[in-house]
Image: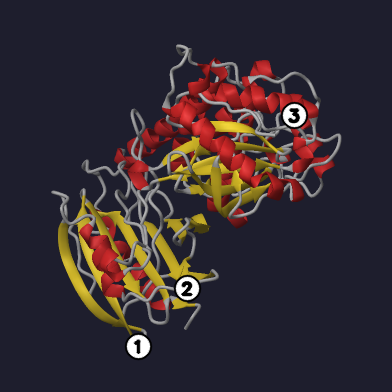
């Protein structure tokens, strides 16, 4: 069977005898489907090289409980697309098939920058498929793999994008029903990062691992609203509940109700109060009330819209940031030991190497700026290799320069370190500093982030990428090229050094009134970058700590 075709073109009236590009597309699609029919009949699960819905499947891009996703080429237009093939277990459910058709049509009618556009959907020889815009990025599940987490600023910004998409869908009468990290795609980085929502309406029955099971709910149980678990009618407020769980998961490194068994998870969603986010992450206490309201058991007690939830989260984060800035400006709140206000050069050549973290995307529209990340972007196009470390665009915009009643100490902080290791390296990191991101997989590199105890604004980032052949100076140069044109940029030191018997690069500079110290190294094929950042007045205080950390780094390949 040639199946049905769903698109915006199909819904438009046309005059008899008119032949348009859409007609040509359908003709080519019909021919391709017919040619592939015999193959598809013998194997209900297509593979790379097959033609499905007028698209040649190029490679398997992802898989999950609801099916598999292929990167494909839409033959009529020659464009790259994503083709999702629905699991045969779901495709055999008549109720699901009917809703699939209806909601694919509805999704195709929504034009929103944070919703992955649907081009086509249909059935070919019993195989349900949906053709979507291809997003060159990574899903949030990958970023958060193995307990990974992001800063509260980045978490709120991601949720703002998703909330905007959900409100647009809800206004159109569409409830997502499966807002999970795997259905949130991220593209771009730093200030330009964008979150997009996909897979609307494909939810019916699966277990907590995403596997289909008869008589159970489909979707990851960690993010399911109580009314969905009770099989009560659901509306957009169920998506608000899921988005609240997402915000908690991004910040805390685990969902709000982590349990060993599905039954215990379900019971927790139905009856347990959500834990306080501030007790399990670096998020401010102001966010606790926002999470609690979003995760209310009764839909009427939650935020009415996803946008209201995101706005409340942003307001709580902004209020906490302002409160910290006010506290830092008050004479009675100043810590007695602070460094001199001049930027100091790091001296000794025997310093370390480390890795840098991914930029926490800055706000778009009315968002407050986010802590930038350091992308190990190391290999220039001329070298023909992929990049590695991200560049921190802003240390902390809340730094205060007002006068303080107490004199700032010129004494460096005592160096106190403790062991830390990842699959890419081992190191000694500052004792007592809060671990904000723990070897988070950012796609091209893995990233860790620590924050100094309050009221200090110092940050330490380490990033690594295995399988890199480019030397440390090329990596550092790529990072340097991204910021050198900034009018506030001021360079204090740059050049090669010897680090633990191998070549490395040291870079000390200021930008935006903040101080940065970066070391890059690649002694054995694993590129590592260490990045220390602070306000200018603190750089002398933390420079010995940053150097000691760098000197302790040992790549796993060495």
| Side of 501 where 97 appears, left or right | right
Question: In this rendering, does residue 403 appear at all?
Answer: yes
Tell me residue 104's x, y (percent): 60, 27
Q: Which residue is mark 1?
A: 501
Residue 205, above or below 143: above
Tell me residue 547's x, y (percent): 34, 72
Residue 429, above or below 534: below
Question: In this rendering, does residue 131 appear at all?
Answer: no
Residue 26, above or below 440: above
Q: Which residue is mark 2?
A: 427
Residue located farthest toward the front when viewing the structure as drawn: 17
Q: Are marks 3 and 2 in contact (CB under 8 Å)?
A: no
Task: Name the secondary structure under disc 2.
Answer: strand
Tell me residue 451's x, y (percent): 43, 54
State the CA–CA distance, disc 3 to disc 2: 51 Å
Residue 84, above or below 101: below
Question: Nearer the observer, disc 1 or disc 2?
Answer: 1
Going 16% across and 62% down the picture, which residue do you hit?
Answer: 491
User: Quick one: 377 or 412, which is closer to the camera?
Assistant: 377
Colouring convention used in this rendered image of the protein: secondary structure
Going 43% across and 39% down the picture, which residue do you hit?
Answer: 77
N-terminal of the pair, mark 3 or mark 2, is 3
Q: Which residue is mark 3?
A: 96
């Amino acid at each position: 069977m040639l199946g049905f075709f769903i698109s915006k073109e199909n819904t438009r009236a046309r005059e008899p005898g008119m032949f348009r590009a859409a007609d040509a597309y359908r003709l080519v699609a019909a021919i391709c489907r017919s040619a592939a029919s015999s193959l598809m009949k013998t194997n209900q699960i297509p593979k790379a090289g097959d033609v499905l819905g007028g698209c040649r499947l190029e490679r398997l891009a992802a898989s999950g409980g609801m099916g598999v996703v292929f990167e494909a080429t839409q033959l009529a237009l020659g464009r790259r697309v994503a083709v999702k093939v629905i699991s045969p277990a779901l495709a055999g459910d008549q109720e699901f098939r009917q809703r699939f058709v209806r909601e694919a049509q509805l999704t195709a009618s929504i034009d929103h920058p944070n919703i992955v556009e649907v081009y086509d959907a249909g059935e070919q020889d019993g195989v349900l498929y949906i053709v979507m815009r291809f997003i060159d990025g990574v899903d949030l599940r990958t970023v958060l793999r193995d307990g990974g987490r992001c800063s509260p600023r980045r978490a709120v910004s991601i949720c703002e994008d998703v909330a905007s998409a959900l409100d647009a869908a809800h206004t159109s009468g569409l409830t997502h029903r499966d807002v999970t990290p795997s259905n949130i795609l991220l593209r771009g980085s730093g200030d330009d990062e964008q979150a997009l929502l996909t897979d609307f309406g494909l939810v019916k029955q699966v277990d907590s691992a995403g596997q289909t099971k008869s008589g159970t709910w489909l979707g990851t149980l960690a993010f399911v609203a109580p009314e969905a678990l009770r099989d009560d009618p659901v509306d957009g407020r169920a998506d608000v509940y899921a988005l609240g769980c997402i915000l908690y998961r991004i910040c805390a490194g685990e969902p709000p109700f982590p349990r060993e068994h599905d039954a215990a998870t379900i019971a927790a969603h139905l009856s347990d109060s959500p834990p306080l986010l501030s007790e399990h992450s670096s998020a401010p206490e102001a966010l606790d009330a926002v999470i609690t309201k979003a995760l209310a058991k009764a839909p009427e007690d939650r935020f009415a819209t996803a946008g209201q939830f995101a706005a409340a989260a942003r307001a709580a984060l902004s209020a906490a940031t302002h409160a910290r800035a006010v506290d830092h400006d008050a004479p009675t709140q100043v810590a007695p030991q602070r460094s001199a206000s001049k930027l100091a050069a790091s001296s000794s050549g025997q310093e370390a190497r480390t890795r840098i973290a991914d930029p926490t995307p800055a706000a778009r529209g009315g968002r407050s700026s986010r802590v930038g990340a350091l992308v190990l972007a190391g290999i220039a196009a001329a070298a023909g290799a992929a990049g590695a470390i991200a560049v921190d665009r802003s240390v902390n915009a809340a730094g205060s320069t007002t006068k303080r009643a107490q004199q700032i100490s010129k004494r460096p902080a005592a160096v106190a370190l403790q062991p830390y290791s990842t699959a890419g390296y081992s190191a000694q990191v500052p004792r007592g500093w809060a671990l904000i991101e723990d070897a988070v997989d950012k796609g091209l590199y893995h990233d860790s982030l620590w924050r100094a105890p309050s009221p200090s604004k110092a940050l330490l980032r380490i990033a690594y990428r295995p399988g890199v052949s480019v030397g440390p100076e090329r990596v550092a140069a790529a990072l340097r090229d991204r910021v050198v044109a900034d009018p506030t940029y001021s360079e204090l030191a740059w050049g090669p050094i010897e680090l633990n018997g191998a070549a490395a690069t040291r870079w000390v500079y200021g930008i935006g009134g903040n101080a940065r110290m970066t070391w890059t190294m690649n002694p054995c094929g694993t590129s590592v970058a260490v990045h220390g950042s602070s306000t200018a007045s603190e750089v002398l205080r933390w420079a010995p700590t940053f150097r000691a950390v760098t000197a302790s780094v040992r790549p796993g390949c060495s």
